[in-house]
Amino acid sequence: MRVSTRGGVIAELAVVAGMGLIAVTALVVLVVLGVRWFSGQPREHASDLNITAALQNTGTFTDTRDSKTYKTVEIGGKVWMAQNLNYKPDSGRSWCYDNNLYNCTKYGRLYDWNTALTVCPAGWRLSSIYDWDNLLLAIDGKRKSHVNESDQFFAWDGVGNKLKSKKGWKSLQDSSSGNGTDDFGFTAVPGGVLLHADGSFDRLGAYANWWTATEFDDGKAAWRYVNYFRDLAVERFDDKGNGFSARCVADSGGGNGNPFDSDERKKNETLTQTDVEQREKAADEKIAKLSDYFKDSRDGRIYRTVKINKARWMAENLNYKTPVGSWCYGDADSNCVKYGRLYEWSAAKTSCPAGWHLPSREEWNDLGKAVGGKIRPVEETGTVDWMEVGIKLKAKIDFNGGGGADTYGFSALPGGFRDIDDRFNKIGTRTYWWTADAYRRNSAYFRFLIYDNGRFDGYLVENALFRNNGLSVRCVENSR
């Protein structure tokens, strides 16, 4: 799946070679995605922090496997290693830059993604994109869409210098320093990368690249980087075979609480089976009362609908076969029956039956507000996340074996998507819907829900994506 925001190491190197100091990223999602995902409540922003006090939240940790000691720092309620990991595992793939042990001592080891997932010591784990977003928010980062002559990408502004070490970074072309201020003791060092494509080492002294624990698909995973010439932390997805650094986060004490571990939820977990059954029966009866039905005269299909506030929505994904530009997930008719069809944006724009239409961004926002969501705008891009709505909109079953409360009968099901390379992904864990609004010339806005067994379960997220990806459609009735 590719969105208009991210890309790979090789693509960027090619552009950097041709354009000097312009950092470029190719376009990808984030469902992923993700763009703006958080595990654990983001705490204070840097504007509210006393930096001296922040630096006092430091310590050390000794890895019992090899007796190496690492500096640690707490930022935004999470405890991070303040150095790149330098543990050589018994299996997997890892390297010292240029195969020089000195570089491992100075910069930590480089790992392919599968190895990076397993190398953090007991009590620690490889940081996820949620951990990184929490960190960057805590130091007052601003997530923005960046555009240059050939690309557009997402990055966090005003954070690169705060993360970078005070020495060791390459100078800029005007001879000014590429070093950072290391305001929070994170001490990012420019450890470079091993490129899987040709096995070469590159970017020592110029880039700090870190794997995250968040997978994109079978071949790619999410990573973050800072470089010597821009005050950014850039979001990327790339080849799992590349060698990047690893930063570990403590399993506990790092603000990773599940927001749904409320007193009400804990009380529900103690209910007897009879209580559970009675509650589910009442929920089913409520959904039945909210529901109405609509028959599509084009093919005779009948859809359940539900009125939420003043808008009537289809309570199922559309399953109308357009002349071009729509598919069943995995080309299996049974998935169309269960999840509806997946549509390119141009097909989605005309797919709804007479009297209905593809909802706009504003109508999706109205839905988020109507179900009691809390808005978290990303002002720099104009995109909007709605918090505390995902569980209310999800069907009670089928999200990775779990589900939501389906409070309003919207009954969102995880139908996955079809990417521009004709691959189907994420059925059972994610659902994506087009909006009627274009983003740029080749992309459009969409909304999505995911299953992640944590904070992001509650979000209805907006992002932009290439128009020829295949996403689901929910139609809304025309105003009368």
Image (spheres, rainbow, N blue to C red):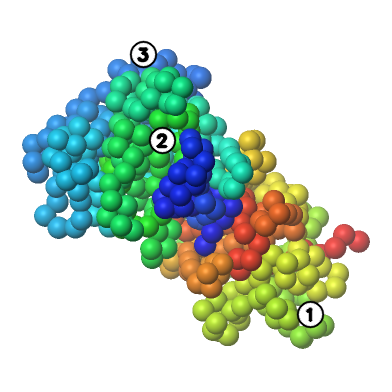
- For residue 20, the mark is none
The residue wearing badge 2 is 226
- Which residue bears the numbered disc 1? 296
Q: Is residue 20 visible?
A: yes
Residue at 46%, 52% (x, y): give it.
11
Between 189 and 478, the one nearer to me in the picture: 189
* Mark 1 residue crowding within 10 angstroms, few (<14) / some (14–19) / many (20+): few
- Which residue position is annotated with label 3? 52
The answer for how far apart the CA atoms under marks 3 and 2 are is 23 Å
Q: Marks 3 and 2: CB-CB under 8 Å?
A: no
Q: Position of residue 85 (x, y in %)?
A: 22, 40
Foreground tag (1 vs 3)? 3
The reply to whether residue 255 is visible in this rendering is no
Q: In this view of the protein, which residue sits in the foreground, 145 or 42? A: 145
Q: CA distance from mark 1 to mark 3?
A: 64 Å
- Element at label 2: strand
- N-term mark: 3 or 2: 3
Front disc: 3 or 2: 2
The residue under label 1 is which amino acid type?
Asp
Residue at x 64%, y 66% (from the top left corner): 468
Observer-side mark, 2 or 1, equals 2
Q: Residue at x 54, y 59 (%)?
A: 2
Across and down, in percent, residue 43 comes to 45, 30
Label 3 sits on a secondary structure element that is helix
